[in-house]
Image (tube, grey):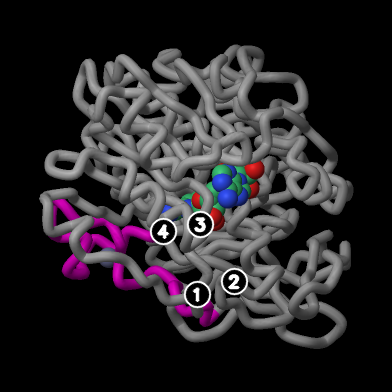
Amino acid sequence: MLLSTRQSRPQSENFSLLNQERSNMSTSGKVIKCKAAVLWGLNQPLSIEEIEVAPPKAHEVRVKILATGICRTDDHAIKGDLAAKFPVILGHEAAGIVESIGEGVTTVKPGDKVIPLCLPQCGQCSSCINPNGNFCEKADITGKGVLSDGTSRFTCRGKPVYQFSSTSTFTEFTVVDEIAITKIDADAPLEKVCLIGCGFSTGYGAAMKTAKVTPGSTCVVFGLGGVGLSVIMGCKVAGASRIIGIDINKDKFEKAKAVGATECINPKDLTKPISEVLKEMTDNSVGYTFEAIGRPETLIDALASCHMSYGTSVIVGLPPSSKMLTYDPMLLFTGRTWKGCTFGGWKSKDDLPILVSDYLAKKFDLDQLITHVLPFTKIKEGFDLLYKGEGIRTVLVM
Ligand code: PAD
Ligand code: ZN
Ligand code: ZN
């Protein structure tokens, strides 16, 4: 029985699972030495180092990471646009297998396939208990870089190394709080569903859950990276009849059309403000706009581009942490709705396993987002692909 379940999985994953079961017995309760990409300071190169990963304490889980995507949010931390403590192990969009659990952990067990949650779900805070909230109060938004007990489980060259976004996945092993991990279907291919750990869920949920795009509507998506393309996929599933993609890199247009954009615009080709161009193109009917870039100017452009009375604009891109926005309040006075959205509005621990099952049921396709697959040690190459605008999502496999 066990053998037949294994036979339905990719060879490499069977091998990992077998190794995992063997290694559990030998590593549980002990410090694990493994490879990780350590960022020693702002704007430094990522350095592949041997690190020590301490065993999980009570209500914590140690995970063997098998696949991790590179998201722009990791780069924001490298550049200082998102707060982090150094040295740090970045990475937050991943999937793996539980190696061992600390005392009191009940929702996962060794051998389970899991996704670490960069937005935890504690189930008890004001956001978690309200059906409409998802931004758990336990989320590490200020970049404290530690688990719930106030410490990290990593050391390197004798120094403590901080965690990132409740996770840290650019490492062969990580430790997370139980509220920051969720069990997924045993048949899920980890090198694909890792994207459900951030980029895909964020974009798809922005359309489906936060904006609640209606059938027949017109949507505009600013930024055609992994997050923006996932917004387009959500708009399409929601039944939008027109989906306009905006990007300053025209090489992104082909993929955007492949996932559902009906047309694409490069703002560099325009002589008028983009909001005016969109108004003319659509006979003033833009119901929804999404900003999936994270720039103050494009946040305002996206707001101004949705219909003045019934339009909704969703902030998906991560704005630089120290920047303030100046905007004309008349944009809102006339009736527009301006909404923020983290992690697609999903309640992470509850909703991610459902998204994984939806993927297995072929409700959406993650392959279109994965442009490159590289061994983990080639992480720098993966970031270069992001910087050159060539990669949508690079998945690093361990
Ligand atoms: P990405 O860098 O792959 O994509 C951004 C796209 O925007 C690229 O295609 C750029 O060419 C394009 N772009 C840049 N500047 C402009 C401009 N001025 N006008 C038009 N297009 C432009 O990033 P991504 O898709 O991985 O992430 C997008 C943003 O979403 C980023 O800020 C990231 O930090 C944020 C994010 N937010 C959440 C959340 O929970 N809200 C989750 C994950 C990522
Ligand atoms: Zn909570
Ligand atoms: Zn991300």
Is residue 92 in the magenta section? no
Q: Earlier in the sequence, mark 2 or mark 1?
A: 2
Residue interval drawn in magenta? 120-144
Dot 1: element: loop
Mark 4 or 3, nearer chain start: 4
Q: Nearer the viewer, mark 4 or mark 3?
A: 3
Q: Of the numbered discs in the image, which one, if any, rests on residue 119?
A: 4
Q: Which mark is residue 62?
A: none
- Secondary structure under the numbered disc 3 in the rendered image: loop
Q: CA distance from mark 1 to mark 4?
A: 17 Å
Q: Gap in Å between the C-alphas at discs 2 and 1?
A: 6 Å
Q: Are marks 1 and 4 in contact (CB under 8 Å)?
A: no
Q: Earlier in the sequence, mark 1 or mark 4?
A: 4
Inspect this view and state whether residue 102 appears. yes
How would you rate the neighbour count of disc 4 (Cα within 10 Å): few for under 14, some for 14-19, many for 20 or more? many
Distance Cα–Cα, label 2 vs label 4? 18 Å
**In the rendered view, would you say 28 is above or below 15?**
below
Mark 4 vs ligand 1: CB below 8 Å = yes
Q: Amino acid at mark 4?
A: Leu
The overriding secondary structure of the stretch rendered in magenta is: loop
Q: Nearer the viewer, mark 1 or mark 4?
A: 1
- The amino acid at mark 3 is Gly
Residue, disc 2: 81
In front: 250, or 24? Answer: 250
Do labels 2 and 1 touch, CB within 8 Å? yes
**What is the x, y in percent for residue 350?**
30, 44
Between 54 and 326, which is closer to the camera in this rendering? 326
Q: Earlier in the sequence, mark 3 or mark 1?
A: 3
* C-alpha span from label 4 to label 3: 18 Å
Q: Earlier in the sequence, mark 2 or mark 3?
A: 2
